[in-house]
Image (cartoon, rainbow, N blue to C red):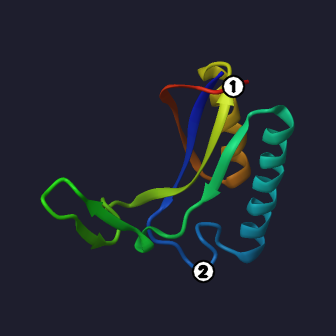
Amino acid sequence: MTQYLLAVHGPAEMGEFGDYGSREAMEAAFAATDAFNDELRAEGSWVFAGGLQPASTATVVDGQGASPVVTDGPYLETKEVLAGFWIVKAPDLDAALALAARGSKACGGKIEVRPFDGLESDG
């Protein structure tokens, strides 16, 4: 099976309750995402997942020169940022897209699907 990145994108600037509008909506999305995570585990598709802190907490390291250059903030200034991700295993792209559709519904965000280059999982 191939491993896929399911990348969750969200707005760069978020309010007190993220992009959800209210505490209740945020808690419902978190609960739905937890349920989706449990489904992935039960189906054998789960590899790893995680949410990310806001892009403002990012640090960029450029080690291409003689000495590394470290700068605060995200690499790109953009309206949308990577908010979280899943690493899943699926038999093919269609199966990964179906997982992404379910994940998108659970977390309430758009999901980009990308296969890993040449990385196959054990099962």
Q: Position of residue 42 (x, y in %)?
A: 87, 38
On the rendered image, what quadrant is the C terminus found in? top right
Q: Which of 17 and 113 is in front in this view?
A: 113
Task: Identify the residue under disc 2.
Answer: 16
In this view, 22 is above or below 110: below
Q: Which of marks 1 and 2 is nearer the N terminus?
A: 2
Q: Nearer the viewer, residue 91 or 20?
A: 91
- Identified by mark 2, the residue type is Glu
Disc sitting over residue 122 in the figure = 1
Compared to 19, does 23 lie above or below? below
Q: In this view, does 107 lie to the left or right of 7?
A: right
Is residue 22 shown above or below 31?
below
Q: Quadrant of residue 81?
A: bottom left
- Residue 104: where, in percent of width, then height? 66, 45
Q: What x and y, as percent, mark residue 119?
A: 53, 27
Is disc 1 placed on a helix, strand or loop? loop
Q: Do the residues labelled 1 and 2 touch (CB within 8 Å)?
A: no
Residue at the bottom extreme? Answer: 16
Residue at 44% from the left image edge and 66% from the top image edge: 12
Quarter of the image that includes the N terminus: top right
The residue that appears at 34% across and 60% down in the rendered structure is 78
Identify the mark at residue 113; answer none if there is no mark.
Answer: none
**Which of 61/31 is in front?**
61
| Picture quadrant of residue 55 | bottom left
| Disc 1 versus disc 2: nearer the observer | 1
51 to the left or right of 12: right
The crowding category of the residue bearing disc 1, from other C-alpha atoms within 10 Å (few below 14, some 14 to 19, many at least 20), is few
- Amino acid under disc 1: Asp
- Point out residue 38 in the picture as x, y percentages from the top left corner: 84, 47
Residue sitting at 80 percent across and 32 percent down?
44
Cα separation between marks 1 and 2: 41 Å
Helix, strand or loop at mark 2:
loop
